[in-house]
Each structure stands twice: as structure tokens, then as C-alpha cells.
Image (cartoon, rainbow, N blue to C red):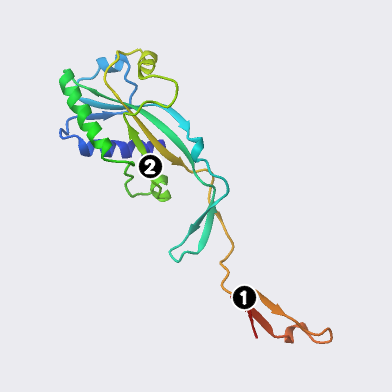
């Protein structure tokens, strides 16, 4: 699930950047990593993963075919908040600010992360992937604490939170669909059961 989110985010950022020579990375922006940068880079570092308990569901989810018939069931997905520290790296601070402005403008035009069609799990689920950018972290922590833990120098950044569904367990089949109503067969004790007529119940009425 996380690699699919990374690739979808990479595609979204790539579509917004006017300069195709800008790299997109997902590395921890440590001081050593920054020293090795020799090309303009937009870095989206995944620094926190937490379940969104407010979105946890119980029971099972029905999976229907093109006719609307239930063919399989599965447990509902669990939702996790993926927090990314998005930064821009160039030789000049002004250029970094321009890159951040482009990235912010791109993220603000999307309430959810576009997931390309393909064989991945997220594409198969067909669910919205909400995301928010540059909002204060909900937990009792600051961006400065993150930079301190990384051992790097504090610089402008965007806090991006993507709430992604994570499939739980395999799908399991269900019995065949019911195509007829319940039937009632009655007969006298001295009559063979096979000769008794079958009366089907449809829409609350018994057909003779």
C-alpha cells in the first residue's frame, strides 16, 4: 500500500513541476544526504504512520459483480495517516521557495490523491484517498522536533498527510444468489411427498 501511495504522489508532483530536471526523492533529509545533493530535488520524507481510529469499521463489506449480485465478502479496510515532510533542495533559497510554491499549489488543487488505474490494491478498492497539505500536525509535536531528530538544519517545509486504506485479510466467497422465493410443500401422511405440489412464495404471496 505505501509503495503505491509513493508512486501516486511521485506522479502527481512530476505533473506539476515545470522543470523535468528536478528529482523527486523519498529519503530522510539528513545533513549527509543534503551534502550529496547536486541536482534540484523535491523530497517527500515519510516520517510517521498512524491508524485513523475514527474511520475504523466493523463487520464485512459486500463485493458485487456487474449485475449487482454479491459474489464475495471481505473485511473493511483500516485507514492509516501517512505524514510526509515535503522539502525543496537547490543551491539558492529563492529557487527552493519557487519549488515549494509550485508543490503547494498542486497539492491544494487536490482534495484526494489521484490513483492511476492498474493492478494495485488501491486501484482495486476504488476508494478516495484524502490528503491535506500545510496544516498543523494534530499530535503534540512540531516540525522543529522532526528536524532535530534528523540531525539536519531547519528549513521551509510542507506537512502533507495522506489517509490511505489498507486491505485487511483475503476476500472469501459467498453462496450462490437466491433466484427463487421460499417454497412450501404440504401433503397428507398417507401421500408420497414427491407427489405434493410445490407452492413458491413470491412478494409475500403463495403461488399455487
**Closest to the observer, 52 or 167:** 52
| Residue at x-position 75% and y-position 81% | 186
Q: Which of marks 2 and 1 is in front?
A: 1
Q: Could you say where residue 123 lies in the image, as x and y percent from the top left? A: 38, 48
**Closest to the observer, 47 or 184:** 184
| Residue at x-position 31% and y-position 37% | 9
131 displayed left or right of 172: left
78 displayed left or right of 114: right
Q: Could you say where residue 195 lies in the image, as x and y percent from the top left? A: 73, 87
The residue at which mark 1 appears reads as 204
**Closest to the observer, 92 or 55:** 55
- Bin the neighbour count of mark 1 within 10 Å (Cα to Cα): few under 14, some 14-19, many 20 and up: few
**Marking on residue 129:** 2
Q: Could you say where residue 11 lies in the image, as x and y percent from the top left? A: 27, 39
- Tell whether label 1 touches label 2 (CB within 8 Å): no
120 displayed left or right of 94: right
Q: Quadrant of residue 134?
A: top left
Q: In the figure, 12 relative to 170: above or below?
A: above
Q: In the figure, 11 relative to 31: above or below?
A: below
Q: Which residue lies furthest to the right in this view?
A: 190
Q: Callout 2: helix, strand or loop?
A: loop
Say whether residue 91 is visible: no
Say whether residue 192 is visible: yes
| Residue at x-position 38% and y-position 42% | 129
Image quarter of the N terminus: top left
12 displayed left or right of 62: left
Q: In the figure, 60 relative to 148: above or below?
A: below
Q: In the figure, 204 relative to 48: above or below?
A: below
Amino acid at each position: 500500500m505505501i509503495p503505491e501511495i509513493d508512486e501516486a504522489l511521485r506522479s502527481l508532483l512530476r505533473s506539476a513541476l515545470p522543470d523535468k530536471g528536478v528529482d523527486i526523492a523519498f529519503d530522510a533529509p539528513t545533513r549527509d544526504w543534503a551534502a550529496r545533493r547536486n541536482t534540484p530535488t523535491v523530497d517527500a520524507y515519510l516520517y510517521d504512520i498512524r491508524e485513523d481510529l475514527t474511520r475504523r469499521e466493523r463487520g464485512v463489506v459486500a463485493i458485487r459483480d456487474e449485475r449487482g449480485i454479491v459474489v464475495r465478502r471481505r473485511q473493511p479496510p483500516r485507514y492509516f495517516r501517512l505524514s510526509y515532510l515535503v522539502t525543496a533542495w537547490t543551491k539558492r533559497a529563492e529557487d527552493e521557495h519557487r519549488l515549494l510554491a509550485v508543490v503547494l499549489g498542486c497539492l491544494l488543487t487536490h482534495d484526494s490523491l489521484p490513483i492511476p488505474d492498474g493492478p494495485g490494491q488501491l486501484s482495486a478498492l476504488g476508494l478516495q484517498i484524502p490528503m491535506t497539505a500545510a496544516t498543523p500536525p494534530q499530535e503534540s509535536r512540531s516540525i522543529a522536533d522532526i528536524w532535530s531528530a534528523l540531525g539536519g538544519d531547519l528549513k521551509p517545509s510542507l506537512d502533507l498527510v495522506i489517509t490511505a486504506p489498507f486491505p485487511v485479510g483475503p476476500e472469501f466467497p459467498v453462496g450462490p444468489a437466491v433466484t427463487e422465493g421460499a417454497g412450501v410443500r404440504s401433503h397428507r401422511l398417507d401421500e408420497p411427498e414427491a407427489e405434493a405440489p410445490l407452492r413458491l412464495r413470491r412478494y409475500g404471496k403463495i403461488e399455487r
